[in-house]
Image (tube, grey):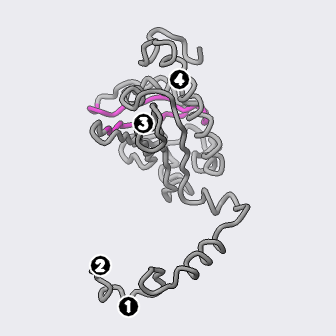
Amino acid sequence: MATASHQLADVPGLIRCETTPREDILALATAGTRPQYAHDEVYGDFCTVQEYIDCPPEDVFDYLCDINSLDEYSVSTRAFEPTEEPGLYAGWDTLGDDTRIFMRLKPNREALTLDYHCAWDQGEELWMIYLFRIVPAEQVLGRPGSVVLWTNCRHPHYDKNPYPELAPSPDRVWVGDLWPLFFAGHRIELENLKRILEYRHSRGLPIEVASGAEVGA
């Protein structure tokens, strides 16, 4: 098999079958597998949650692409409405007192991906990025339904509010202070998403957001 190994010879630390015996590769993988990991080792810079949902991928995608679905499955974001800027929505995040959250949805139907571009307090720099991918479960699990992958990356702004002058009060909690809880919090929201979609799909009900339903109902 032809390779470009001559281009890799000067790269230090590579582990490849051309240079490392199989036994050594397996030993390294075994040594790197531990029964327990510190929380920051797993979720320090990236936070990913995933779930199987017994609902067709296209229906999951369409539901997530409706910004009003956040009123149903999210823990805290509510009442998004269009702003004067096309494609930009403003709502409320109840995790902070009197806190506005701004969002753009960036979907790709062909790839079944959806990105939420968000920020607290202002809509100019949407640096909080929520990355969703919906995978047909038939491809990866051999059964109908969907696998939802949801990833957040720890942007430097999580560590320090870039616009403190826009906060409703100086002692308002900052979203980055909650980063250690992102996995557990998003896990709750993903389980909400699963329950809503599976309930409606299994009963032949419309998947879309319930019209006229009270928030929290």
Q: Nearer the viewer, mark 2 or mark 1?
A: 2
Residue holding disc 1? 10
In three-dimensional space, the C-alpha distance between marks 4 and 1, rounded to whole angstroms, equals 52 Å
Q: Residue 198, which numbered label?
A: 4
Q: Residues within 10 Å of mark 2 (few under 14, many from 20)?
A: few
Residue holding disc 3? 102
In three-dimensional space, the C-alpha distance between marks 3 and 1, rounded to whole angstroms, equals 46 Å
- Horizontal side of residue 89 vs 186, given as left or right: left
Instruction: Specify whether residue 74 is painted magenta.
Output: no
In three-dimensional space, the C-alpha distance between marks 2 and 3, rounded to whole angstroms, equals 51 Å
Q: Nearer the viewer, mark 2 or mark 4?
A: 2
- Horizontal side of residue 163 vs 112, given as left or right: right
Residue holding disc 2? 1
Please give the name of the residue rendered at 50% of the width and 59% of the height, measured from the top-left corner: 156
Cβ atoms at labels 2 and 3 below 8 Å apart? no
Please give the name of the residue rendered at 43% of the width and 47% of the height, measured from the top-left corner: 129
| Mark 3 or 1, nearer chain start | 1
The x and y percentages for residue 101 are 47, 35
Q: Residues within 10 Å of mark 4 (few under 14, many from 20)?
A: many
Amino acid type of the residue that numbered disc 3 sits on in the rendered structure: Phe
In three-dimensional space, the C-alpha distance between marks 3 and 4, rounded to whole angstroms, equals 29 Å
Please give the name of the residue rendered at 70% of the width and 61% of the height, measured from the top-left corner: 38
Q: Secondary structure at mark 4?
A: helix
Q: Residues within 10 Å of mark 1 (few under 14, many from 20)?
A: few
| Residues drawn in magenta | 85-107
Q: Is residue 12 above or below residue 108?
A: below
